């Protein structure tokens, strides 16, 4: 009785095992190879092919991921370069005169006055007399522009052109300076001329003219530094 009942169960188990192994090890042609019928070489070959396909899928996924990261990095770099290009266009390295008499060169930003990125900032140095005429802009109130430039003047030789907006210039002022002991003794000190960068934007025209002319007070007779904005 035991042999009669066990026979169908064993047969069913073998059939089930054969089906599972056929499912686990498909061939490249779509046919299934069971562990009972397949040789060890066939099984090893099938596993190698599946491993190779898996490696190709992983490599393709990694490449796609790397492409996305590279695209984002390139986009960020383009944005930084664009911002730097705009800053270079509307900034200038100008001398900054410190209170102790030293001078440092710093990059100063000048917001554009001409619209639509059609201009750029330039620094020009020219000795006195400049040989140019400044005026108030009719189209842009509060701005000082170059109305005329003599053909053989120092301004013309330095590159100043009619229509330039003068954004800043060097200026000089006289101040009384005295050591502490002299102040305590009631002395008034001695005059000393200091040089500085004068921001012209929005300043009264008469004050601008005085600032430009004050460069005559420079005891070292250095060239006037002009920061101008020019249309391309």
Image (spheres, rainbow, N blue to C red):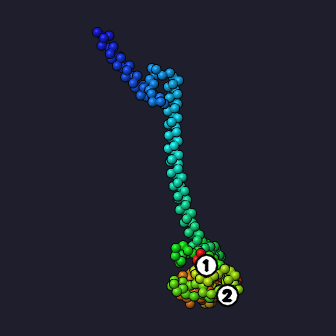
Q: Tell me the quarter of the image containing the C terminus.
A: bottom right
Residue 37 rendering spot, x and y as whole percentages: 46, 20
- The reply, left or right, for residue 133 in relation to residue 68 is right
Q: Tell me the quarter of the image containing the N terminus.
A: top left
Residue 150 - label: 2
Front-most of 24 and 171? 24
Q: In this view, does 7 lie above or below 106?
A: above
Q: Is residue 174 above or below residue 46?
A: below
* Secondary structure of the residue carrying numbered label 2: loop
Q: In this view, does 91 lie above or below 35?
A: below
The answer to which image quadrant residue 146 occupies is bottom right
Counting residues from the start of the chain, the first of labels 2 and 1 encountered is: 2
**Residue at 48%, 22% in the rendered image:** 38
* Secondary structure of the residue carrying numbered label 1: strand
Front-most of 206 and 5? 5
Crowdedness of circle 2 by 10 Å Cα count: few (<14), some, many (20+)? some
**Residue at 51%, 55% in the rendered image:** 72
The answer, for residue 184, to whether it is visible in the render is no
Mark 1 lies on residue: 227
Disc 2 versus disc 1: nearer the observer:
2
Q: Do the residues labelled 2 and 1 touch (CB within 8 Å)?
A: no
Residue 209 rendering spot, x and y as whole percentages: 59, 88
Q: How far apart are marks 2 and 1 (CA)?
A: 19 Å
Residue 67 - label: none
The answer, for residue 231, to whether it is visible in the render is yes
């Amino acid at each position: 009785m035991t042999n009669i009942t066990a026979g169908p169960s064993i047969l069913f188990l073998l059939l089930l095992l054969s089906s599972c192994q056929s499912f686990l090890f498909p061939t490249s042609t779509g046919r299934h190879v069971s562990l009972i019928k397949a040789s060890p070489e066939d099984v090893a070959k099938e596993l190698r092919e599946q491993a190779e396909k898996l490696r190709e899928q992983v490599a393709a996924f990694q490449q796609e991921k790397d492409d996305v990261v590279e695209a984002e990095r390139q986009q960020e770099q383009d944005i930084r370069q664009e911002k730097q290009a705009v800053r270079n266009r509307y900034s200038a390295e100008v001398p900054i005169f410190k209170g102790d008499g030293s001078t440092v060169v710093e990059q100063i930003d000048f917001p554009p006055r001409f619209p639509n990125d059609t201009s750029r900032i330039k620094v020009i140095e020219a000795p006195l007399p400049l040989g140019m005429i400044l005026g108030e802009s009719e189209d842009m109130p509060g701005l000082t522009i170059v109305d005329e430039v003599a053909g053989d003047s120092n301004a013309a030789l330095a590159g100043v052109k009619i229509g330039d907006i003068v954004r800043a210039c060097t200026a000089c002022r006289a101040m009384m300076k005295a050591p502490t002991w002299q102040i305590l003794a009631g002395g008034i000190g001695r005059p000393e001329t200091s040089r500085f960068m004068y921001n012209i934007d929005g300043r009264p025209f008469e004050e601008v003219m005085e600032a430009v002319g004050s460069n005559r007070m420079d005891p070292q007779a250095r060239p006037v530094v002009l920061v101008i904005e020019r249309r391309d």
